[in-house]
Image (tube, rainbow, N blue to C red):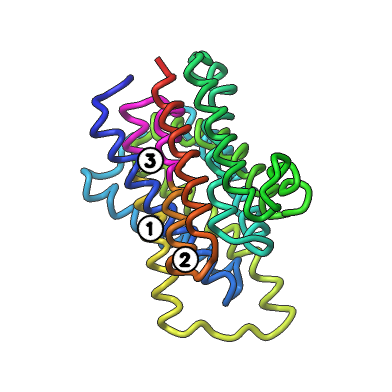
Amino acid sequence: MKGPMIPWGLFSLVSAAANAGYLFGLKRLSGENNEDLVAAGSFLSASVVLLILEILSGGLHAPGPFLLPAIAGTTVLNALALLLVFRAFRHTDISIAAPMLSFTPAVLLLISPLFEGSNLTARGIVGVVTIVAGSYVLSAPRCGGSLMAPFIALKEDHGVRAMLVVAVLYAFSSQLDRAVVQQSDPFLGSSMVTMLLGLFFLIRAGPRRLSGPVPPHPWHTRVKIAVIGLLLAIEIAGLNAAFLFAPVPYAIALKRTSGVFSVLLGCLLGGEKGLFQRAVGSGVMAIGAAVVVLSVP
């Protein structure tokens, strides 16, 4: 089900940019506030936006028979992934953590035959090797520049390890996300997923609120949480639209160029150092993602 390059490619790139903005805002806000409350607010805000888009698109659509199992599966995987994202953010810079998600397309090339029947090709192998080369460039400045840099980073940087696990979880959840779209539409099922995730993190925040005083969030913090929720909704809607025109490895590979946007946001707005090295590493990883896109027949 492959459509013209411009529509689905544009949707994936919009999703990538929104994802980078969402992760940047999530890191900044979770560092200053209760991270569970920030996650809950962003997911619930995204759920409302997606539900409004569903109504504007023509009303509620009849769900397919496998919608609920797909929703349950992707909700669990995404909840685990975000918990690991928070752990990564506590140990490393976003411009190093987020580009590790570029490994998701590599994992998809291995698991997609189970879901879509696509095969690993020579160009796909080249794309995977290019992504790994990008991770070398990205990790070298942190580890002395040796050829063993990525392995050192995996051993010493908890954030890198956590984000690599997140990349694997997102590979499986992406397949379920596409099933959610196929069983409903780009908005309805995802609004249910984000609502469930919002409720999960709201419940997690409960014991912390009961164990001690939690300072109230001022109005401008609530507005910021709503803004990253809007970015999350844009990310989800853009990716779901891409799923309508392209297989999952295609759409996700382009979305993972979000690592480049994350590097720019982390270094230019977050005050993180090493822009040149990280930009080069993320750029190489993005090239690898593009080769992966071209590898799927």
Q: Which residues are magenta?
A: 239-257
N-terminal label among 2 and 1: 2
The front one of 35 and 168 is 168
| Mark 1, residue position | 231
Q: Residue at x 73, y 41 (%)?
A: 148
N-terminal label among 3 and 1: 1
**Taking the image as drawn, is residue 261 in sight?**
yes
Q: Which mark is residue 25?
A: 2
**Taking the image as drawn, is residue 183 in sight?**
no
The C terminus - image quarter: top left
Q: Amino acid at mark 1?
A: Leu
Left or right side of 184 for 7: left
Asked if residue 250 is among those painted magenta in the image, a careful observer would answer yes
Q: Which mark is residue 201?
A: none
The answer to which image quadrant residue 273 occupies is bottom right
Q: Secondary structure at mark 3?
A: helix
The answer to which image quadrant residue 295 occupies is top left
Q: Residue at x 40, y 47 (%)?
A: 16
Label 3 to label 2, Cα distance in Å?
Answer: 19 Å
Is label 3 in contact with label 2 (beta carbons under 8 Å)?
A: no
Q: Residue at x 26, y 28 (%)?
A: 5
N-terminal label among 3 and 2: 2
Q: In terms of secondary structure, what is the magenta stretch mainly?
A: helix
The front one of 209 and 125 is 125
| Mark 3, residue position | 239
Is label 2 in contact with label 1 (beta carbons under 8 Å)?
A: yes
The image shows residue 40 at horizontal and vertical percentages of 53, 63
Circle 2 or circle 1, nearest the eye? 2
In this view, 97 is above or below 250:
below
Label 2 to label 1, Cα distance in Å?
Answer: 9 Å
Q: Amino acid at mark 3?
A: Leu
Asked if residue 210 is among those painted magenta in the image, a careful observer would answer no
